[in-house]
Amino acid sequence: MACKKYEKICFDNGSVDKLEMVDDMSGKPEDYKQYIKTFKWNQRKYNQKQPLKELCDAFLKTLQTNDAHIKKFVDELSGKKSKLQMMTKKEGNTLMVRDYTDDIYTSNKLSIQNFLEGKTQKYGSASEVFANMLIVVPKTKLHGLADDLKLAMSDYYKTIDESEDKRITDMARLKLQEVRDMPEADRKEFLSHLKLAAMPVEPKDLEDFKNQPKEVQEEHNSQKEKYRKDNEAWEKLAVAQIEAHVIMAQLKEKRAQRMPYCIVPDAPFDCEIKDKENNSVYRIIVYKPQAEDVIKALRKRGYTPRLFAYNKTAWEEENKERSLLSEQVQNATTQLNKVAVAAYQQLFTALIHLKVVRAYIDGVLRFGIPPKFFIGVVMPRKGAERTVLTDMMNVLADEKLKDMYGEKQDAQESEDYWPFVCVHLTSPNFMHGQKE
């Protein structure tokens, strides 16, 4: 798995179409396929005289060392890519989708004077009350834009108010539930403010109710019924009081704070930015505290709005930063590729030695001691693996035992069974596409 991961990193982050090894001694490149064909045990790196456990520990150390080394480069590249992704402008075929900020700053027809900042720059600070809003206007809505803007907010608030008015009783009941959960002192203060009596107290359940005398049961049931009626009447009065003195008061205060004309009633300014579908960008001025309401209202009417602050200096600095970050990503990618290529060679070398060890051990377990068998490498073309295995079985298997061998027939069988030891090598994966 580790070899496959490193191989993927090499091809995902590099421009190579194949990997080559570098000989430790001569420094000359060597094809992986040739290395496999002419494999010789590296006694200097993996001493065959070591106990098996120490040999396997050496393979594991190779993996752990390279994993720790490459992780630093992978994390660095991922961090830079994420940052670049956040700075990358959204692309698309239409203005409804793509970010058109660059169009504004690169246009010869637009300047700071076409935006709110041009009107407030002489004061040395941006407006705290008003803001620019850019809206993408579909071709079909272009001619009715000015009239639509006049009605947008009144229609929006009318719909909101009607919806809230229908939910006043529900809101009062929710508030009453909050009151029930209040600490006792806070609850008393709240009820006193609304001139409400204390909540009725529910009678406690009797222990061993069924074994109580009949008259005790009847008295208890009578108290329960009285509590139910009293609580129902009290709750009805409490909901009415909360509706009138809490919910309605909150709604009235909220609605009184609205600016009725939060879209400044001047003609929308055409930024002369269009797409191939003839959608256009217009600039309007809105009341900043209600800007989110304006965005919601215009979206409901089929426009695509966004707040915008004109700052060409910040835009230029962001472009420089994005260009620098893009270069850093490319450099980090190149560096990761180099590290991955070197790490892949180390891991593959360890892997091929480990495969040989496994083949040897399986061979001893299968054929006994002293070992009298041949270990070789078979490199079939892609798709021909099963055919080659079957042909080898036909050649090597005892005629009377051929029925024992072959691919596993059900999930309970651990693996295929052949008259020879077969250890698969699934990496390098890129070799499968190479021609002899």
Image: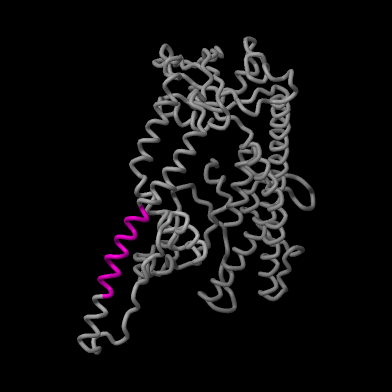
Residue sitting at x 56%, y 26%: 287
The image shows residue 57, relative to residue 3, as above or below, that is below
Is 264 or 68 nearer to us in this picture? 264
Q: Where does residue 245 sit, x and y in percent of width and height?
A: 43, 47
Image side of residue 161 versus residue 189, left or right: left
Q: Quadrant of residue 417?
A: bottom left
* Chief secondary structure of the magenta portion: helix
Q: Residue at x 69, y 31 (%)?
A: 322
The residues colored magenta run: 223-239
x, y (%) of residue 215?
Answer: 21, 85
User: Which picture quadrant has residue 351?
Assistant: bottom right
Residue 302 placement, left or right of 119: left
Give the x, y percent position of residue 254. 49, 38
Q: Quadrant of the C terminus?
A: top right
Quarter occupied by the N terminus: bottom right
With respect to residue 257, does 51 lie above or below? below
Asked whether 275 or 223 is in front, the reply is 223
Residue 39, located in which quarter of the rendered image? bottom right
Q: Position of residue 151 (x, y in %)?
A: 42, 21
Residue lying furthest front:
195
Which residue, as the protein is rendered here, is positioned at the far top?
109
Q: Is residue 93 left or right of residue 104?
A: left
Residue 233 among those drawn in magenta? yes
Name the outermost residue toward the left. 214
| Residue sitting at x 42%, y 18% | 148
Total labels: the figure holds 0
Q: Is residue 258 above or below residue 77?
A: above
Viewer-proximal residue among 108 and 386: 108
Q: Residue at x 35, y 44 (%)?
A: 167
**Colour logic:** one colour
